[in-house]
Each structure stands twice: as structure tokens, then as C-alpha cells.
Image (tube, helix red, strand yellow):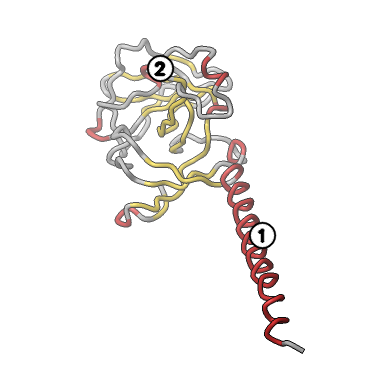
Amino acid sequence: MDFNSEFREKEPSDILKKILGWFETFLIAFLIYMVIHAFLFEVTVVSMSSMEDTLVSGQRLIIWKPPKYLSGPRRGDIVSFKYIEGKRTGLADILIPFPDPYEVDYIKRVIGLPGDEIDIRDGKVYINGKELEEKYVKGGYTDDRQMLFPRTVPDGKLFVMGDNRAVSRDSREFGFIDIDSIRGKAVFSIWPLSRLGPVK
């Protein structure tokens, strides 16, 4: 019996089994990642200065995204949401399932909840007639951007602003946002290492 010949016949089969095993492992890992990314967590990058000094440009955050994150948004939450920039045309529908070219990710802080009366005067924010304590605001001053206040937040909507109020493009400019547009809540910073930890 030619043992070398028998070994050579088995060798390609063993290699194929290993390749299939690696592929199966990769496929399972990829599916787990997709499920986690779609329903639980994702990583996003802060691309602007509108949330300074709380968040900085280039900072990487873990976004927790169960539907309405179980209890719904709360005042003070830092949330990621989709916003349509510019004039959307039928082109956006043609490009599905590719990313919508008019859809932009924003990261802002929830200030007003449905039913809240929002007022901005003398550089301060008032919720239902009571001044909102905001130690996170850069410079400590909030401009009303010549928006007429007070305003009441409609059902299914939120009023959001960046912490760097002098430069932030937010609800003072584009109005209330849909609760359904929220992708999730920023819960943890992973980069840079100097900011590693929970997002407060």
C-alpha cells in the first residue's frame, strides 16, 4: 500500500474542511455583529464642535440603540439622530438601499420633551417657567437665534441643542425633531483614550 499516495489524496480534503470551518466561523461572527449593530450598539464619530466641551471633534462614541431605548429619551440625554439637509428630491428614493445623500447624522442634547414649554431669554433656558441648570454649556450663554419664544414641544417631537451654543446648529434653527429620527443614546466614549469612559 502506498501510504504517501493515500496521504496526498486526503490532504486537499482536510484543507477544504479547514477553509469551510474558518468561513463558517467568520459568517457567524459577521451575523452576530450585524445583529448587534442593527439593534443594540453602533460606533459613531463626532465630526463637529457643536458639543464642546462635553464632546470634541474626532471623538468616538458607542451609541445604545434599542427602540426608544426602552424608556424613551430623557432631558439631558445626548442623542444621535438623522436629519434631512437641503431639498430632498426623488433621487434619494432611487438610491435606496444606498445612504441617503441628504441625510446627515447629528449629535445633540435633549432639552425639551413633548408638552414642555421652552423659553430662552437673557441667555438662559427655561422649561415650563423654571430655569434649566446647564453647567455643560460652553460659555454659559444661550442665544435665541431670533426664534420666537416661548414654544411648546408637540407630541412625538423633541427640542435639542448642542452644548457649544454659539456655533451649534440645532432646534433654534431647524425646529423640533421627530422622536422616531433618533438612532440612539451616546453612552460610552472609546476614543481618544483621555476621554475613555461613560458619556455623562
Dot 2: what SS?
A: helix
Percent position of residue 181, x then y: 53, 27
Task: Quickly name the residue at label 1.
Answer: 24
What residue type is disc 1 on?
Glu
Which residue sits at x=31%, y=34%?
48
Percent position of residue 149, x then y: 38, 13
Query: Relative to 155, is 193 above or below?
Result: below
Percent position of residue 178, x then y: 53, 23
Q: Is residue 171 left or right of residue 164?
A: right
Residue 95, labelled with which disc? none
Query: Relative to 104, is 3 above or below?
Result: below
What residue type is disc 2 on?
Phe
Q: Earlier in the sequence, mark 2 or mark 1?
A: 1
Which residue sits at x=36%, y=17%?
173
Percent position of residue 2, x then y: 73, 87
The reply to whether residue 164 is in sight is yes
Dot 1: what SS?
A: helix
| 122 or 4: nearer the viewer | 4
Q: CA distance from mark 2 to mark 1?
A: 47 Å
Occupied quadrant, residue 107: top left
Query: Relative to 96, is 174 above or below?
Result: above
Q: Residues within 10 Å of mark 1 (few under 14, many from 20)?
A: few
Q: Is residue 31 left or right of residue 185?
A: right
Q: Nearer the viewer, mark 2 or mark 1?
A: 1
Occupied quadrant, residue 136: top left
Task: Quickly name the residue at label 2.
Answer: 174
- Residue sticking out furthest to the left: 139
Which residue sits at x=32%, y=57%?
193
Q: Is residue 33 left or right of residue 148?
A: right
| 61 or 151: nearer the viewer | 61
